[in-house]
Amino acid sequence: MKRRTKQVIAVVVVLAVLLALAYFGQSDRSMRFGTARIGGVYYTFGKELKEILSSEGVKLNIKETAGSAANLRLLSGNTIQLAIAQTDVLYDAWTGTALFEGEKLQGYSAVAGLYTEACQIVTAADSGIQSIRDLQGKKISIGEKESGTEQNAKQILLAYELTEDMLEEVSMNYSEAAEALEKGEIDAFFYTGGAQSAMVDELAQKIGLRLLSVEGKEKENLLSSYQYYFPCTIPAGTYLGQDTEVETIGVRPVLLVSNKVKKDVVRKITKALYQHVQELQAGIPTKLSLSEEEIPVPLHKGAEEYYNSVRSS
């Protein structure tokens, strides 16, 4: 009898420890933050925000992911508690359309829009590729699967009437694509991210690059067909050897948080985001333009509280 009692006590203790670990692992102050792969601005931004929030008593664990679509799936399932996603992909996930046809992914809210991401189509300067139409018959990286870049690439190619059977599409993350272009294993790659990108800049210094424009009727069709695209220009001199400005389209990434994260913690995150904007800006190569406007999902109540307090002060 005593032996059985000891066994029961042991089981209870083990269960209590497991529950405690689960509780603390899921606590609001130890949140998993889904960014994207190393080499992109999402990851760089995530690292900078982690440092800032650490001083505010909020702990983040940065998780590399495939990007926007993957982040939304993980966030909806509360596998991660904080994430970044492009507004166009976010809209589709929230409404259950396009890539997410028939499956609405919700359970999260917005903190803030962050900056402008330009859709960049990169090829080697000596490739002979002068326009998007010249991609026909070429081997192209359209971005990692489940990324916002992949969705943008497919929509841009479709606007130029370039179907899958007219070129060879491969799925690579940014670092893989840059390395493959440098080695001549692919002819071009799509990259949706802030300009200037450290990864693209480094590649430009190694081999020389050309950025392809999204322009004319194709650009107008994209702007009219997808409500979260907007006109975007990459200024001349953004990358080494880029002597003229490049027309393209852009989207905005949004910082998102699980609805299970407590209101006071989200308010603290939102406040830190705005109060430390200069520190964040110093750590990333893209111009921040924080905003609560034009976000296709509701704001988290904690973020709302912060914005209301600023407006009333």
Image: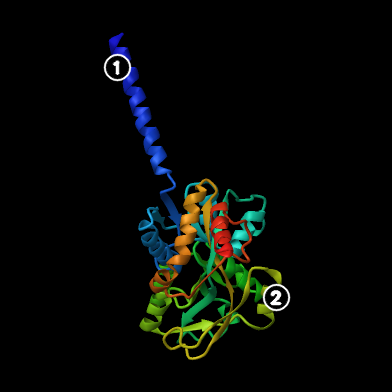
Residue 81 appears in view: no
Please report the residue visible at 49 percent of the width from the left and 76 percent of the height from the top: 188
Please report the residue visible at 57 percent of the width from the left and 54 percent of the height from the top: 300
Measured along the vertical axis of the image, is residue 236 above or below residue 149?
A: below
x and y, in percent, of residue 172 in the image: 46, 65
Residue type marked 2: Asn
Measured along the vertical axis of the image, is residue 4 above or below residue 216?
A: above
Q: Quadrant of the N terminus?
A: top left
Q: Secondary structure at mark 2?
A: helix
Residue placed most toward the observer, 250 or 128: 250
- Provide the residue designation for mark 1: 6
Residue placed most toward the observer, 51 or 275: 275
Q: Is residue 191 left or right of residue 60?
A: right
Measured along the vertical axis of the image, is residue 231 above or below residue 291?
A: below
Q: Going from the N terminus, do you reach mark 2 or mark 1 first?
A: 1
* Colour style of the rendered protein structure: rainbow
- Provide the residue designation for mark 2: 221
Q: Residues within 10 Å of mark 2 (few under 14, many from 20)?
A: some
Q: Quadrant of the C terminus?
A: bottom right
Residue 263 appears in view: yes
